Amino acid sequence: MANDTFSALAAHPCPAVPAAPTHHAADLPLLVEYTLSEFVRAETQALAEVDQALEPLLSAARDAVLGGGKRVRPQFAYWGWRSVAGPHAPVGMVLPALAALELLHAFALVHDDVMDRSDTRRGRPTAHRALADGHRAAGLRGDAAHFGDAAAVLAGDLLLVWADRLMARAGVPDRTLREARAAYDRMRVEAIAGQFLDVLGDCARTWSPERALRTARLKTAGYTATWPLHYGAALADAGGGGFARGPLGRAFTRYGLAVGEAFQLRDDLLGLFGEPSVTGKPVGDDLGKPTMLLLLAQARASAAQRAELAAVLAAPRPDVARLAAVVRDTGAPEQLSEMIGERVADAHAALAAAPVDDDTRTALGELAAAVAWRAA
């Protein structure tokens, strides 16, 4: 079976990404999308030839990658790369490595949805729900929900392997790829540590604002902005990673932490006050998690408001609209928005001192605002 699998994969190599005649940032989302779609097509075709029964697994993995997304992580990595490579370097050589971050992201989302028991993602059923529905539709034996969870975990694992396979196709020297891999590995370790804290927060009796921010830094900031920037810069650095210890690395770390925290704090607001038709997820999906928004609301609440918050959260089916009204009345959303603004300002301050060209500084400033004040 293993030999058949590897033979099939070898028979369907991922098509080379055409070298782009231009390398404007505006081209990047389409280039990333092309890279992902061609890679996923080749990988799924190869595995489907091993056994057609794998189709539900492959469909779940394919949908997780190609079912939408903002593609912000490749953008941060691109500007990290460009800051070292310069404005005229051909982006085609590093596109596989940039696009691989979306496979890593898809892996994290599939597993996160299983852990959070989420029903929808981007307006569609989550992987584990879709797989469970497929189990029922096919009339298979056993528990459909358990099958959905187990199959979704495997789909996430497959996406993680795909990320490694796609990254390895980058046209950079082995030493350079090893340096980039160090940033990539740290990104993954921190994301897993942050995800554990997120899961622990669901059942912890107490949770501090400091720990909530630490969770955001590990789970979100590192793998959204900080390490993609370092990863991208390492892909262009043939000098053994020296930039990471210099002013550029320090600026990227400061900027990335600020932007990543702003991203997560905005996520907290959207989780309770977002528009489901825009976010693709129902409000209250993270109900009960010790988010910074909820911690601020509890700290600012009057005795009566605190009692009402506790009553809503303790209910078997919490009233999300009532919770949102109480949280809003505490003034916590305004305070959280101020915290987001402070982080955007800190990101701009980091850019002002960074040794980057004006185009990079402008683009990263715009990215900071885009992720901090996004609607979905």
Image (cartoon, rainbow, N blue to C red):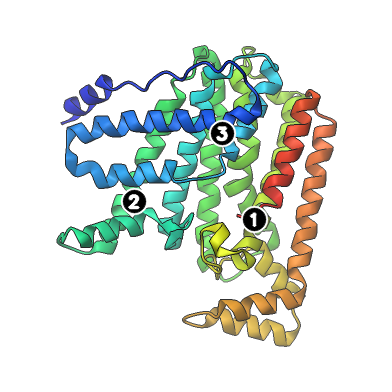
Q: Disc number at residue 152?
A: 2
Q: Which of marks 1 and 2 is nearer the N terminus?
A: 2
Q: Disc number at residue 228?
A: none
Q: Earlier in the sequence, mark 1 or mark 3?
A: 3
Secondary structure, mark 3, is: helix
Q: Which amino acid does label 3 sit on?
A: Pro
Q: How far apart are marks 2 and 3 (CA)?
A: 26 Å
Q: Which residue is drawn at 61% across and 69% down?
A: 206
Q: What residue type is labelled 2?
A: Ala
Secondary structure, mark 2, is: helix
Q: Quadrant of the N terminus?
A: top left
Where 317 falls versus 193 (above or below)? below
Question: Residue 30: x, y in percent?
Answer: 53, 31
Q: Is residue 287 visible?
A: yes
Taking the image as shown, residue 162 lies to the left or right of residue 276, namely left
Taking the image as shown, residue 80 lies to the left or right of residue 193, namely right
Q: Quadrant of residue 223?
A: top right
Q: How far apart are marks 1 and 2 (CA)?
A: 27 Å
Q: Disc number at residue 29?
A: 3
Q: Quadrant of residue 4?
A: top left
Q: Earlier in the sequence, mark 2 or mark 3?
A: 3
Q: Residue at x 58, y 37 (%)?
A: 73
